[in-house]
Image (tube, rainbow, N blue to C red):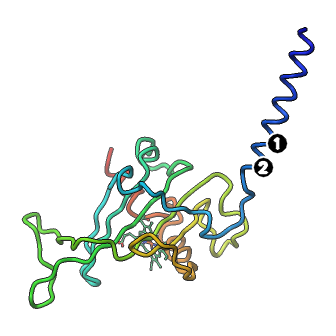
C-alpha cells in the first residue's frame, strides 16, 4: 500500500516536472519577453512623474505592486519588476509653452503618446554581449495604445548601461527607493 502510494507520488512528480518544462518557454533574448499587462493602468503603482521641458512631455513611471512592496534602498529591484514609462503631452499656452499647475508642475493632456518598458526576470539577459547586457533586464517599446513597436532597442540598453550600471540599470526607480527611506 505504502509502496504503491510512493510510486504514484513519484509518477505525479515526474508528470508535474514534465508539464512545467513544457509550459515554460525557453528564454531567447528580445523584447518579445515583455508583455504589457492589460490591467496595468488599474493595478500598477505610479511612483514618479518627470516633466521634460525640452520635449514638452510628461513621463509617468509605474511599477507592479509586488515589486513596489519589496524594494529596498540601495538594492537591486526584485525579479518580476516591470517598469512602465508612459508619456503624455504637456498642456501648452497659446505661445506653445507648457502651462504649470499650482505646484509648478506640467499639466498632462489626456492620452498616452508612447510607452517604454523594462522588465527583469531570473535568467534574462543571457545572450547579450557585455557591451549591451543590462543584467537581467529586457526592454520593449509600445505605442500609446499599447501596440508593440518593432524598433531597434540598442539605444535603450546602451544609455541605461552607460549611465546606470551601478544603479541596477534604471534611473527613477532606483532613485525612488533611495529617497523612500
Ligand atoms: C539617452 C539615454 C536613454 C535612452 C536611449 C533610453 N533611456 Fe530610458 N531613461 C533614460 C532616463 C534619463 C530616464 C529617467 C527619466 C527621464 O529623465 O526621462 C529613463 C527612464 C526609463 C524608464 C523608467 C524607469 C527608469 O529607468 O527610470 C523606462 C521603462 C525606460 N527608460 C525605458 C527605455 C526604453 C524602452 C528605451 C528604448 C526605446 C529607453 N529607455 C531609452 C535614459 C534613456
**In this view, 151 is above or below 77:** below
Task: Name the residue at 10% across, 68% down.
Answer: 101
**In the visual, does 60 lie left or right of 83?**
left
User: From this viewpoint, which residue is outermost toward the bottom?
Assistant: 95
Q: Secondary structure under badge 1?
A: helix
Residue 104 x, y percent position in the rendering:
12, 68
Instruction: Report the residue marked by disc 1.
Output: 18
Q: Label 2 near label 1: C-beta < 8 Å?
A: yes
Q: Quadrant of residue 7?
A: top right
Q: Quadrant of residue 70?
A: top left
Placement of the C terminus among the 4 image quadrants: top left
Count of marks placed on residues: 2
Residue that mark 2 sits on:
22
- For residue 82, above or below residue 114: above
User: Is residue 139 rendered to the left or right of residue 20?
Assistant: left
Badge 2 element? helix
Amino acid at each position: 500500500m505504502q509502496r504503491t502510494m510512493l510510486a504514484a507520488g513519484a509518477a505525479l512528480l515526474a508528470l508535474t516536472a514534465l508539464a512545467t518544462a513544457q509550459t515554460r518557454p525557453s528564454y531567447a533574448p528580445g523584447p518579445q519577453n515583455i508583455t504589457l499587462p492589460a490591467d496595468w493602468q488599474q493595478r500598477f503603482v505610479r511612483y514618479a512623474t518627470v516633466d521634460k521641458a525640452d520635449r514638452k512631455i510628461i513621463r509617468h513611471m509605474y511599477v507592479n505592486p509586488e515589486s513596489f512592496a519589496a524594494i529596498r534602498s540601495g538594492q537591486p529591484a526584485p525579479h518580476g519588476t516591470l517598469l512602465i514609462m508612459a508619456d503624455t503631452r504637456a498642456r501648452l499656452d497659446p505661445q506653445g509653452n507648457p502651462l504649470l499647475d499650482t505646484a509648478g508642475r506640467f499639466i498632462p493632456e489626456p492620452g498616452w503618446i508612447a510607452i517604454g518598458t523594462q522588465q527583469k526576470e531570473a535568467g534574462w539577459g543571457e545572450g547579450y554581449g557585455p557591451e549591451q547586457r543590462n543584467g537581467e533586464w529586457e526592454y520593449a517599446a509600445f505605442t500609446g495604445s499599447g501596440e508593440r513597436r518593432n524598433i531597434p532597442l540598442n539605444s535603450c540598453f546602451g544609455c541605461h548601461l552607460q549611465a546606470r550600471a551601478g544603479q541596477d540599470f534604471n534611473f527613477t526607480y532606483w532613485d525612488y527607493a533611495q529617497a523612500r527611506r
